[in-house]
Amino acid sequence: MSLPEAVTLVEVGPRDGLQGQPVTLSVEDRVALITMLAKAGLSRIEAGSFVSPTRIPPMRDSGKVLSGLKESSARYCVLTPNMRGLNDALAAGAQEVAVFTGVSETFVQKNIHCSIAESMARFQPVVEAAKDAGVLVRGYLSCTMGCPYEGETDLNAVAHIARDLYQMGCYEISMGDTIGVGNPVRVQKMIELAGRDIPVPALAVHFHDTYGQAIANIYAAMESGISVIDTAVAGLGGCPYAKGASGNVATEDVLFMLNGMGIHTGVDMDALLQVNQQVCSKLGCSNYSRTAQALLSKK
């Protein structure tokens, strides 16, 4: 199969990357981080999450972050799990919102305290209201490859729930390997099954690199027609409800691979490395990108 000529990297660091960090960045620091990512050429960026600040303290004041961002060519997305979150996001000027569920009943119960069916029912009015407001809605689907509580995931169930999210009105479905247990064969089978009811251009992938398989899985996904890939600067992230799950695949690592293959992204590596150094310094955390480690060691 042929590879795409261009790929869109969806930068999830400012939301998925920060939400599990022990350090909570200020509104000013988060605005600066997102602004730097946009200037580096990332055209789609997760800017925050309108969830309870007592449950996810690093996402506190996401409305102020969103309001503090100046107009740019980048499009900013925020998570809105319910109508209150959506209304707050719209008031802050959201351009795109996202809803999220999973394939595993146990994971969804621990994450958002309801069943999969209940989560879908909860999202329906959110999606409808967002679309009425002229705002795009993205759908996130967790545990597509495996669950920390239930083990290997049924790929037919992945395709079924992805279809329901698409038919509900989500313009794009990001399929996440939350605990990083996927492999290229299962990734391609998942895309094949989901692609029977959803146009492949409406599918994206979101892989964690727990077992070092994310790059291989991304390549397999691109062979299957995927051209939208979620990544996080410095490999930040992880899941508070999936013990042992390491961070998202690093934006720098994916960019290095795509640059080497001549696939266009519009992202500048040198500018991205500056963001890497800035955010790791602010968080006092390790740099999990092997590409960034190698390139920065030469400077």
Image: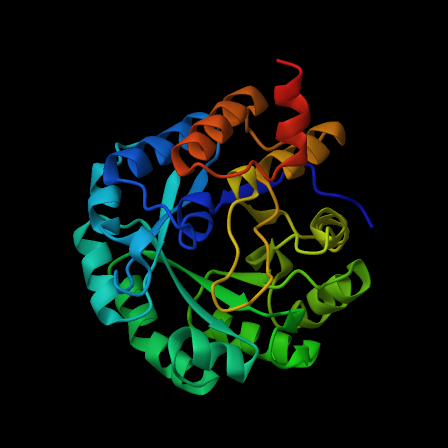
Residue drawn at x 62%, y 40% is 7
Tally of marks: 0
Name the spot of residue 159 as percent of width and height, x first.
63, 75
x 44%, y 86%: residue? 115
Q: Quadrant of the C terminus?
A: top right
Asked whether 109 or 223 is in front, the reply is: 109
Which of the two residues, 37 or 59, is positioned nearer the viewer here?
A: 59
Q: Is residue 106 left or right of residue 217?
A: left
Q: Position of residue 108 (x, y in %)?
A: 47, 78
Q: Residue furthest top?
A: 299
Q: In the picture provided, is 269 more to the left or to the right than 99?
A: right
Horizontal and vertical percent position of residue 290: 67, 35
Tell me the quarter of the picture where residue 80 sits. Answer: bottom left
Q: Residue sitting at 25 percent across and 53 percent down?
A: 60
Residue 262 visible from this viewpoint: yes
Which residue sits at x=61%, y=55%? 208
Q: Splitting the image into 4 quarters, where does residue 254 fall?
A: top right
- Above or below, comparing residue 286 to residue 197 in the picture: above
- Against 70, is 14 above or below? below
